[in-house]
Amino acid sequence: MPQNRGGRRAPAPGPARTAGRPRRPGAPRRGRWRRRLAWTLGSLVGLALVGLGAATTAAAVLWVTTPELSVEFDIEPTVVTDVNGDHIGELQEHPGREDLGIDELPPHVVDAVIAAEDAGFRDHAGVSVSGIARATWSNLRHGEVRQGGSTITQQYVKNLTGDQEETLARKLREAVLAVRLERDRSKDEILEGYLNSIYFGRGAYGIQAAARAYFDVDARDLTVDEAAQLAAVVPAPSALDPEREPVASSQRYASVIDRMHAEGMLDREEASELREVPPLVRPGGQGLAAQRAPHFLAMVEQRLADLVGPAAVHRGLEVRTSLDLRAQDAAERAHADALGSLDIPEGETAPVAALVAIDPATGGIRAHVAGADFGTDQYDLVTGGPEGLGRQPGSTFKPFALAAFVEDGNSPDSMVDAPATATFAAEDARLDSDWTVGNYEGQELGSVTLREATWRSSNTAYAQLAMDLGPERVLNAARRAGVDAPGKLRPDPSLVLGTGAVTPLELAGAYSTFAAEGTRRAPTAVLEVVDHEGERQYRANTDGDRAFEPEVAHAVTDVLRGVITSGTGTAAAIGRPAAGKTGTTSSHADAWFAGYTPDLAAVAWFGHRDDNEPIHGAPTGGGAPAALWADFVAEALADVAPSEFPPPPDDLPLAEDLADALCEPGDPACDEPATPGPPVGPDADGEAATDAPGDASTDGASDGVSNEAPDGGPSGPPAPSDDATEPSRAPDGTPATTPGAPDPPEGEGEPPADG
């Protein structure tokens, strides 16, 4: 009898299987045999193709002409215009470009680049077989060209030809040219040409311009750590700029130091010392500081790197943007006046402010004032910098809960309770401890309509609304409007009070969705790109996507109009139809006003850039931010005839019992997952090479509160003079943040004060 070493009895011999007969347990699966056969045949075909490719490459090398060892740089700079065709500025290469001989550079400069980009450079014949194999496997797995496996020689060929297309045909041609170049030129000649032509970011082409752009030194004087830092930015100059992306840059820098050690270029002690602290770089953007709207130009420059490739950004492009210079001028004047009017005592740190405006019809960014003087600080307060760091929005987040409530078919005139304080017990599965919420200065509003609770920015009413709706519904509505595309926010009950973090650009985009009657359009900076040969490389898609039904947006707008006419935002009244919401955190570290007319949405923010330091004088969103918003919008629309908002729906039922009026648990609408909406970043909706649809008097900031609606909107009860409200508190009286959640990141821990 046959023996089975595995301890299991070997199957007894038997007759061959016949068609239709069930397979015996333990018999080989026909599918597995077929898969093995298919894999074997596929491997043979693959090897044959590799052999054919090698033969083709060898034959091509015999007749392809070696490219000239020079890169054309005498092209005009990239010209950037506004939406009307008016000149904004130019993006040009760094003026310090100078070709250097390989023997003029310190050995560690050459070593750093070789270690970072192509450790086998001295040994291969132009292409790396192992590199190509790794890249091919990755590309096959992802179904697209994502890695190139490029050697230094191949990168140099790419610079020489100017061909940025990521296709297999281009990679094969590049490989052929690289092999030919290696046959006809020395390694030092290739390396010298590469170092003098590679793009390092900041408009710097070549190692000499890069040394001046990042460290203000001659390349001949670069230290080891400086050389490693420059080598670190080569793969993605914008995404790895130490100033723009400090975390990613420092990780890449440490990786380069480790590679230099692994290649024997640094000893262990030196590598260990160097990798801990990257060298300091000088502020970037010096060439933009003297131009108009420099923060916006920096945004455009970074966006162009994504659209046409970093090497083409400064080479004769014509770029039409969404900015309107007339609106930009109005924004800069209003911004300067607002900061200049603050009474900051000597010794106190003055706050900064940001202002951004969006055209609801296109998503185009019409004005962009990002904070401090660009010459001394390139940080963009509008976008939250490269990492998109936001600030707590306070009660500017409440309209998203209002939208979800109206989506359930309820009228904003439904009655809600707005007590001075409200405590939500930990018995609720969403809370790990009791959650206590309070209104500003202990205001007891009693039983009011949700409309009035919005005007007076009641925290207790909206906390109850979020608990009844479910925080997932609130977050889902915010994401559909345009907030939180990266998925930073969590569906916690306190989110409705603005305990998360959003950027002014995100919030302006979300409010523009309400202004556009529920159609969301991603904020867009770049509208069209034409290269130096007149070929269009990109055109933005501004069609938009339906986020809310028009009736929902109309109802939200009708309520938010009352915030300006009868609530906490009367300082934003401009004598024409407008809607908006105030927002202030409990520590008074952030003060917001977000609002819109039918023609323009804008957000104004005040605070301190680096921390949660309270603003002197504890201003609220209804103070300086609302006044800044009003001054800007009034001037920006001075030559535009006032437009009316569409009327709100008149058939929404009143909800007598708020909880009963909402959808029941288990209802698909209640259980709708809070999935992110479309990307929020500038130009995120754009498609390459496609056709897209292409001084008024002001009421000023009122010291009192009028029951009259200057623009014909609804009148209501007197509004509180302040926008801020009491912070949420835990049972022990300490300020509470997100209930039942871990401690928030630094800078996101303060609950909203108001409104």
Image: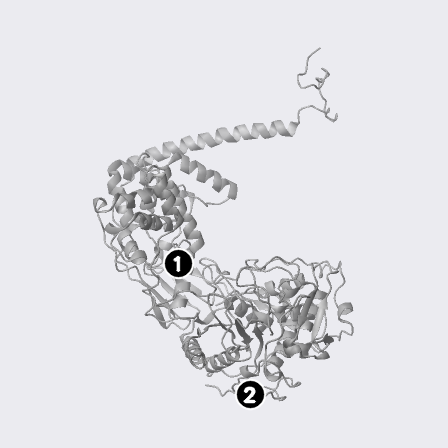
Q: Residues within 10 Å of mark 2 (few under 14, many from 20)?
A: few
Q: Residue at x 51, y 83 (%)?
A: 641
The image position of residue 322, as x and y in percent, is: 44, 69
The image position of residue 86, as x and y in percent, is: 37, 73
Left or right of 457 on screen, residue 428: right
User: Which colour scheme appears in the figure?
Assistant: one colour
* Residue furthest to the front: 732
Left or right of 617 on screen, residue 493: right
Quadrant hosting residue 90: bottom left
Residue 165 visible in the picture: no
Q: CA distance from mark 2 to mark 1?
A: 43 Å
Which quadrant is the C terminus positioned in?
bottom right
Out of 336 and 239, give the one closest to the viewer.
336
Q: Residue at x 31, y 49 (%)?
A: 227
Q: Amino acid at mark 2?
A: Asp
Q: Which residue is mark 2?
A: 703
Q: Which residue is mark 1?
A: 243
* Residue furthest to the top: 1
Q: Secondary structure at mark 2?
A: loop
